[in-house]
Image (spheres, rainbow, N blue to C red):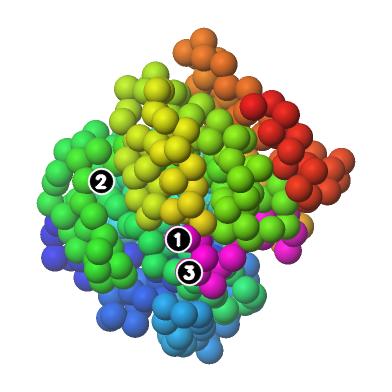
Amino acid sequence: MADAVVSEPVLVWGGGAIGGTLAACWARAGVPVLMVDVEAEHVRVSAAEGLAVEGPVETFRQLVPAVTPDRVEGRFGRIVLAVKAQATETATRMLAPHLAEDGFVLSAQNGLNERAIAAIVGPERTMGCFVNFGADWLGPGRILYGNRGAVVVGEIDGSLRERTRAMFELLRVFEPEAVLTDDIWSYLWGKMGYGAMLFATALTNDSMTANFADPARAPALIGLAREVCALAAAERVSPRGFNGYDPAAFAPGAPEAEARACLARLADFNSRTAKTHTGIWRDLAVRRRRTEVDAQIGVMVAIAQAHGIAAPLIARLVSLIHDVEEGRRPMSVETFHALTAAS
Ligand SMILES: NC(=O)C1=CN([C@@H]2O[C@H](COP(=O)(O)OP(=O)(O)OC[C@H]3O[C@@H](n4cnc5c(N)ncnc54)[C@H](OP(=O)(O)O)[C@@H]3O)[C@@H](O)[C@H]2O)C=CC1
Ligand SMILES: CC(C)(CO)C(=O)C(=O)O
């Protein structure tokens, strides 16, 4: 990567829980960043008073250069996209005029958003990334960094290039155990399985750990992960594990005991975070807004149909989250077991 590009700011588009944590950590380390967010007060506080990162991992306040999208000027070689999945297309269209011809967009999101990004800016200008650290946007200029977690980067075509290695080094500034991979889709599909279970936990008000530790919820959680793993296989992807999640435990023929042992590991991993509930739960219970369910989980219904594979739990999960979003059902153990009924 040319020196001129390395000295120019990394544009972090979407400066909430994930983007804000990355931007603050990079800025503190002396990496030039420019954070872009639609929340004007968040932008003002972060730039003028400092973005406060708090919680058990790190507590610091860092001035982060930040603007709203209408104030971005120029073109950038490295854009890290960290909006919710349903905002991906809108945000990518907004950032596209600011992306250098030879630059790239890296998706620090959950889901298969790289496909949508590539459709807009082109596959050559899209880089894959998987993040599993936990963070919450608490308010303007305030983010909870709840726990460290896996961070993986790789090109969507599996190649390893100078720019991929450079981005890997940049991610290591944030997470020293970051991984460089030639198979980013295996991690993204790994998170699709874990993510489907996380969406199910958000049908209740219980913490992630309480959900994963409840034996009565295991059939629905295991069933979901098995459906996702079957879809990944149909897509010719071998999903990979991370932070206690092991897709092999949900592969066809894997013993139920392995799947239950995996749930116990996830209960344990999530018992050691200050972020007790998912971002999905937070959207529903705290922010009172729609979740990423269509963009993250709904896409799998279409993938299942394309392969002629039945995915009843995934489809039921999408409709139950919609029920909660639209006030037809409460977040409750009873609502969770409306999912169990489909298993
Ligand atoms: N939080 C976590 O612990 C984890 C999150 N992820 C994933 O990371 C992604 C980002 O999530 P998260 O950081 O939690 O979300 P947040 O809502 O905290 O942050 C996203 C930010 O982007 C802003 N935004 C929305 N649209 C635009 C736009 N067009 N241009 C610029 N900014 C915009 C949002 O504003 P507004 O709120 O007003 O829309 C918000 O401030 C998601 O895909 C999530 O699933 C992955 C692992 C862990
Ligand atoms: C729970 C977490 C942080 C993954 O560990 C997540 O991805 C989310 O909140 O949606």
Distance from disc 1 to disc 2, alpha carbons, whole Å, reads 25 Å
Residue at (29, 80) in percent of width and height: 29
- Mark 2 vs mark 3: which is more N-terminal? 2
Q: Position of residue 140 (x, y in %)?
A: 62, 77
Q: Quadrant of ligand 1?
A: bottom right
Q: Secondary structure at mark 1?
A: helix
Q: Position of residue 147 (x, y in %)?
A: 45, 69
Residue 125 visible here: no
Q: Is residue 275 magenta?
A: yes
Q: Is mark 1 within 8 Å of ligand 2?
A: yes
Q: Position of residue 55 (x, y in %)?
A: 50, 80
Mark whose residue sits in front, 1 or 2: 1
Residue beneath disc 1: 269
Q: Residue furthest top?
A: 308
Residue at (52, 19) in percent of width and height: 304
In contact (CB < 8 Å): disc 1 and disc 3: yes
Majority SS type along the magenta span: helix
- Identify which amino acid the numbered label 3 is placed on: Arg
Q: Position of residue 289 (x, y in %)?
A: 73, 53
Residue at (87, 41) in percent of width and height: 328
Distance from disc 2 to disc 3, alpha carbons, whole Å, reads 28 Å
- Identify which amino acid the numbered label 1 is placed on: Phe
